[in-house]
C-alpha cells in the first residue's frame, strides 16, 4: 500500500496551501463579518484552474483526480470554510451534473464556462417542505408548447444568486410514473429566465461569506431541451451527485478541523498561565493529541474514498462514512480548540470563533448526521 502522494497531487496540495494561507486566510475574518462574497478569490481560483480541477481538459477543466480535488478543498477550508464551500458546491454540485448527464450541446453551452470558473451554477434540490425527504419535491414543471413551465420554491441554494451565477439545476415534478408516484426530473434554469427570482441572501450563523438563497419560480419558462438527462430520473441523478459530493464535504470538514487545530497549537504555545505556556500542561497536551488523532483518521477516510473513486472502485460507503465521521470530528476538534483559547476564543477577533460557527453546517448539509446513518445502514444491507 502506497501512502505517498504523486508529484501532481503534491504540487496541487502545495499550490492550494500557499494560496489558502497567503490569500484566503488574510481576508476570512472580514468576509465573514461583512458577509462579503469573495469574488476576487473565485477569480484567483479560476486562474489557478481550481474551479474545474477534476474536470476533463477538453471541457475547460484541469484534468486532475479526485484525491487532488479533496486536498484542494481541505487546504482552502483550513483557511476559510466559506471560500471552500463556494469551490466545493460549484464543482461537486453545480457543474458535475451537467458533465455527467448533459448532452454535448448542454456541456458546450453551460458546462464549459463553469469548468473555466467564469460562471457559478446552483444545485436546487432542497425545498421548504422537502429537506431530508428530497422525494417530497413540490416544485412542478409542465411541458406546454415545447417549454417547461415551472412553479415552486427552492430553499438554501448555494452559489445561486451571485453576480457571476449562470443558473441553477432544479428537481421538479414533471408528471406521475406508472406506479402512481411523482415523476421527478432535472431542469437547467438559466439566471435570466423570466419568472425566476432569487431572494436576498440568508442571514447565516456560519459560511457567512458564501452565497445561499431561496429561489422562486412563477410560470418560469425554459425550452424543452433544458431537461437534464432522462425524464423521471432527476432524483436518481441528484443522489448520484450527492455520493461524490460527500467526498468534498468530508474534505471540507477535515480542513476546518485542521484550521482549528493549527490555531489551538499556536495559541497554547503563546498563552502563559501559572508561569508557563499552557501547552506545558498535560491536560492541554492530551487535548491536542486527541485532536490530531481524530483529524488524521478522518483525513485517511476522505483520501481513501477519493482514491476509490479515482480507481473506479465502489466508493459510496467509504464516502458516507467519511462524511459522517469528519463532520463529527470537526465538531469535537473546534470545540476543544476553542476551549484551549479560554475566554479569548469567545471573542470575534480570534479565528477560532468563526471556525466554531462555520463547523455546525458540516453535520447538516448534504445529508444530516441522522440521514447519513440511514444511508450507511442501507449501504450495508439493512
Ligand atoms: C448553508 C446551507 C447551504 C445549503 N446548500 C444547499 C444547496 O446548494 N442545494 C440544496 O439542494 N440544498 C442545500 N442545503 C440544504 C441542506 O442540504 C438541508 O438543510 C439538509 O439536507 C437538511 O434538510 P432540512 O434542513 O430541511 O432538515 P430536515 O430534513 O427537516 O431535518 C430536521 C431534523 O430531522 C432529522 N430527520 C429528518 N428525517 C429523518 C429521519 N428519516 N430519521 C431521523 N432523523 C431525521 C434531521 O436529521 C434533522 O436533525 C443547504 C443548507 C444550508 C443550511
Image (cartoon, rainbow, N blue to C red):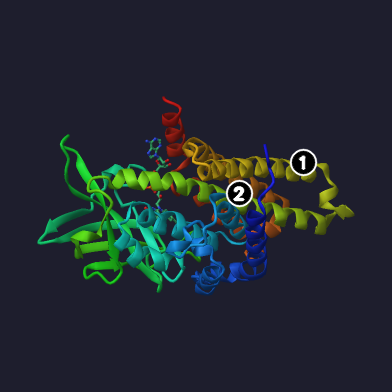
Q: Marks 2 and 1: which is nearer the front?
A: 2
Residue furthest toward the top? 382
Q: Is mark 2 within 8 Å of ligand 1?
A: no
Residue furthest toward the left? 145
Q: Which mark is residue 115?
A: none
Q: Residue at x 66, y 61 (%)?
A: 17
Q: Residue at x 25, y 50 (%)?
A: 185
Give the SS element for disc 2: helix
For the residues labelled 2 and 1, the Cα–Cα distance comes to 19 Å
Q: Quadrant of residue 9?
A: bottom right
| Quadrant that contains the N terminus | top right
Q: Position of residue 245 (x, y in %)?
A: 46, 49
Q: Is residue 342 above or below residue 281?
A: below
| Quadrant that contains the C terminus | top left
Name the residue that disc number 2 marks. Answer: 254
Q: Which mark is residue 286?
A: 1
Q: Nearer the viewer, residue 80 or 148?
A: 148
Q: Is residue 114 at all visible to an observer of this figure?
A: yes
Q: Nearer the viewer, residue 245 or 352?
A: 245
Q: Position of residue 261 (x, y in %)?
A: 69, 52
Q: Position of residue 323 (x, y in %)?
A: 52, 43
Residue furthest toward the front? 58
Q: Residue at x 54, y 63 (%)?
A: 50
Q: Quadrant of residue 119?
A: bottom left
Give the SS element for disc 1: helix
Q: Is residue 275 left or right of residue 7?
A: right
Contact between marks 2 and 1 (CB within 8 A): the answer is no
Q: Is residue 274 left or right of residue 94?
A: right
Crowd class of label 1 (few under 14; some 14 to 19; many from 20; radius 10 Å): few
Q: Residue at x 38, y 56 (%)?
A: 99
Q: Is residue 206 at all visible to an observer of this figure?
A: no
Q: Is residue 179 above or below residue 335?
A: above
Amino acid at each position: 500500500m502506497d501512502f505517498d502522494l504523486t508529484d501532481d497531487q503534491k504540487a496541487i496540495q502545495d499550490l492550494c496551501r500557499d494560496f489558502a494561507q497567503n490569500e484566503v486566510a488574510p481576508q476570512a475574518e472580514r468576509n465573514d463579518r461583512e458577509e462579503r462574497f469573495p469574488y476576487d478569490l473565485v477569480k484567483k481560483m479560476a486562474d489557478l484552474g481550481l474551479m474545474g480541477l477534476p474536470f476533463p481538459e477538453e471541457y475547460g477543466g484541469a484534468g486532475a483526480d479526485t484525491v487532488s480535488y479533496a486536498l484542494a478543498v481541505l487546504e482552502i477550508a483550513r483557511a476559510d470554510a466559506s471560500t471552500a464551500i463556494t469551490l466545493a458546491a460549484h464543482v461537486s454540485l453545480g457543474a458535475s451534473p451537467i458533465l455527467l448527464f448533459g448532452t454535448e450541446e448542454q456541456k458546450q453551452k453551460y458546462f464549459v464556462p463553469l469548468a473555466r470558473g467564469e460562471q457559478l451554477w446552483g444545485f436546487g434540490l432542497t425545498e421548504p417542505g422537502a429537506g431530508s425527504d428530497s422525494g417530497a419535491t413540490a416544485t412542478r414543471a409542465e411541458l406546454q408548447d415545447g417549454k417547461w413551465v415551472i412553479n415552486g420554491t427552492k430553499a438554501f441554494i448555494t452559489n445561486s444568486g451571485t453576480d457571476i451565477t449562470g443558473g441553477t439545476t432544479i428537481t421538479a415534478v414533471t408528471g406521475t410514473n406508472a406506479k402512481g408516484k411523482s415523476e421527478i426530473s432535472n431542469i437547467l434554469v438559466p439566471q435570466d429566465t423570466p419568472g425566476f427570482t432569487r431572494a436576498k441572501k440568508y442571514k447565516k450563523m456560519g459560511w457567512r461569506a458564501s452565497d445561499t438563497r431561496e429561489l422562486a419560480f412563477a410560470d418560469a419558462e425554459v425550452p424543452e431541451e433544458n431537461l437534464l438527462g432522462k425524464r423521471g430520473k432527476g432524483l436518481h441523478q441528484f443522489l448520484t451527485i450527492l455520493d461524490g459530493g460527500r467526498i468534498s464535504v468530508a474534505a471540507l470538514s477535515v480542513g476546518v478541523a485542521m484550521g482549528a487545530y493549527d490555531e489551538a497549537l499556536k495559541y497554547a504555545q503563546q498563552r502563559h498561565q501559572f508561569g508557563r505556556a499552557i501547552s506545558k500542561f498535560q491536560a492541554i497536551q492530551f487535548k491536542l493529541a486527541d485532536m490530531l488523532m481524530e483529524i488524521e483518521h478522518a483525513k485517511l477516510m476522505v483520501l481513501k474514498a477519493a482514491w476509490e473513486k479515482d480507481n473506479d472502485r465502489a466508493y459510496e460507503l467509504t464516502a458516507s462514512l467519511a462524511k459522517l465521521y469528519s463532520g463529527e470530528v470537526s465538531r469535537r476538534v473546534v470545540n476543544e480548540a476553542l476551549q484551549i483559547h479560554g475566554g479569548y476564543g469567545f471573542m470575534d477577533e480570534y479565528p477560532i470563533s468563526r471556525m466554531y460557527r462555520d463547523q455546525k453546517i458540516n453535520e447538516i448539509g448534504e445529508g444530516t448526521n441522522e440521514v447519513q446513518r440511514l444511508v450507511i445502514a442501507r449501504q450495508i444491507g439493512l
